[in-house]
Image (spheres, rainbow, N blue to C red):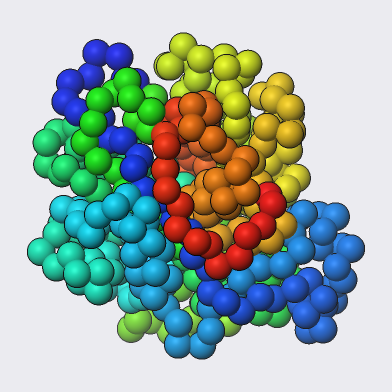
């Protein structure tokens, strides 16, 4: 579902604030190897991940979202937003949504607030939603947060998935502005294919496996992913979505300064870049230090790259993501002048 800027009416959504936050606890590959049949070399070879941050017991997705949201509002030089969107697969509760609590804790009680559930594509879907609200005149300033605590749904003894995922949150502030100014997000491409819903799933906890049914098994309560099939779909869908977004904008691969993909694992990121004919050095990654943080991965990657002075005003960026559903999406923007709040650590992606 491409959505292109030329000819659209209404103001554009312009990026004016950015922040990322991860919980302090770091889990290294060596620590995982103590409980799993694996080692640092095996993990790095297959995923590119060296470590990840994990939430402490009692620390919820909303806690991470509030911290990232507070920092993003500071980055934007404002304490207000009339809409709060939280993209997450790990809400605090099945009901109610997490966003209203986040809004209230940020002093934004009364703002429109809702969750977006598109798994790892959630942040791109959230960007498109925010852009639509601003273009329609429903919102003037949107705080969009991608936050996930996958450690709460991944079996810690699952060798295939426990090595991949980390916890974190990233947030952006979007204001009404001009489609031609730096920071304006647009030329979206969104898509889904529910025929493959079983490739990435948590079987229990919803209306399909009701609370009144038999007790779910241990496996049904935890995250499951069919890795080889997901890999194939991720590369194909992300590359196709990226091409559609570029075509809508009239851009070519050569026009891009940076490709910022969902941080699934390093092999997927490099495969997508290769498929697009894009040199790997233009692929922004922080997966080595963060792992796969779900809906938080894109804003976290942007915040880390900006902190490392890799992304600069005027750079042309392509953002692309893929997640369960299946879902995928891409969008383009020219990077604006931003003030970044101090990160929990300074890393070089």
Residue 302 shows in this picture: yes
Q: Residue at x 72, y 57 (%)?
A: 288
Instruction: Name the residue nearer the viewer: 36 or 32.
Output: 32
Q: Position of residue 17 (x, y in %)?
A: 36, 48
To which quarter of the image does residue 96 belong? bottom left
Residue 4 drawn above or below residue 207: above
Q: Residue at x 46, y 11 (%)?
A: 250
Q: Position of residue 289 (x, y in %)?
A: 68, 61
Q: Position of residue 16 (x, y in %)?
A: 34, 43
Q: Position of residue 106 (x, y in %)?
A: 25, 69
Q: Is residue 67 left or right of residue 246?
A: left
Q: Is residue 332 left or right of residue 222?
A: left
To which quarter of the image does residue 170 belong? bottom left
To which quarter of the image does residue 209 belong? bottom left
Instruction: Name the residue nearer the viewer: 279 or 205.
Output: 279
Instruction: Name the residue nearer the viewer: 5 or 122.
Output: 5
Q: How many marks?
A: 0
Name the image quarter holding the N terminus: top left
Q: Is residue 203 left or right of residue 239?
A: left
Residue 316 drawn above or below residue 225: above
Residue 341 drawn above or below residue 161: above
Residue 44 drawn above or below residue 61: above
Q: Is residue 349 left or right of residue 112?
A: right
Residue 222 shows in this picture: no
Q: Residue at x 53, y 84 (%)?
A: 56
């Amino acid at each position: 579902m491409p959505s292109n800027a030329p000819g659209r009416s209404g103001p554009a959504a312009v990026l004016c604030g950015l922040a990322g936050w991860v919980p302090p606890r770091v889990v290294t590959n060596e620590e995982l190897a103590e409980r799993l049949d694996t080692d640092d070399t095996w993990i790095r070879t297959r995923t590119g991940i060296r470590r990840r941050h994990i939430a402490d017991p009692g620390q919820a997705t909303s806690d991470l979202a509030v911290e990232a949201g507070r920092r993003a509002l500071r980055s934007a030089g404002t304490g207000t937003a009339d809409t709060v969107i939280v993209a997450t697969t790990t809400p605090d509760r099945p009901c109610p949504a997490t966003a209203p609590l986040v809004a209230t804790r940020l002093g934004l009680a009364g703002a429109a607030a809702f969750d977006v559930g598109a798994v790892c594509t959630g942040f791109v879907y959230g960007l498109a939603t925010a852009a639509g609200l601003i273009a329609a005149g429903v919102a003037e300033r949107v705080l969009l947060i991608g936050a996930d605590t996958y450690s709460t749904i991944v079996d810690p003894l699952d060798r295939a998935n426990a090595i991949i995922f980390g916890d974190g949150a990233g947030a952006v502030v979007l204001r009404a502005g001009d489609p031609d100014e730096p920071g304006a997000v647009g030329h979206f491409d969104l898509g889904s294919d529910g025929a493959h819903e079983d490739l990435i799933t948590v079987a229990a906890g919803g209306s399909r496996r009701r609370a009144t049914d038999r007790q779910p098994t241990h496996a049904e309560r935890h995250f499951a992913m069919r890795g080889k099939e997901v890999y194939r779909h991720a590369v194909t869908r992300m590359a196709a979505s990226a091409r559609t977004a570029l075509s809508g904008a009239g851009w070519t691969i050569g026009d891009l300064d940076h490709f910022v993909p969902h941080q699934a694992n390093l092999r997927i990121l490099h495969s997508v870049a290769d498929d697009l004919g894009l040199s790997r050095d233009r692929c922004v990654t922080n997966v080595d230090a963060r792992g796969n943080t779900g809906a938080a991965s894109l804003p976290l990657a942007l915040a880390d790259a900006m902190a490392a002075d890799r992304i600069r005003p005027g750079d042309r960026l392509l953002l692309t993501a893929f997640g369960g559903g299946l879902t995928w999406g891409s969008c383009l923007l020219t990077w604006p002048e931003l003030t970044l709040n101090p990160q929990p650590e300074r890393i070089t992606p």
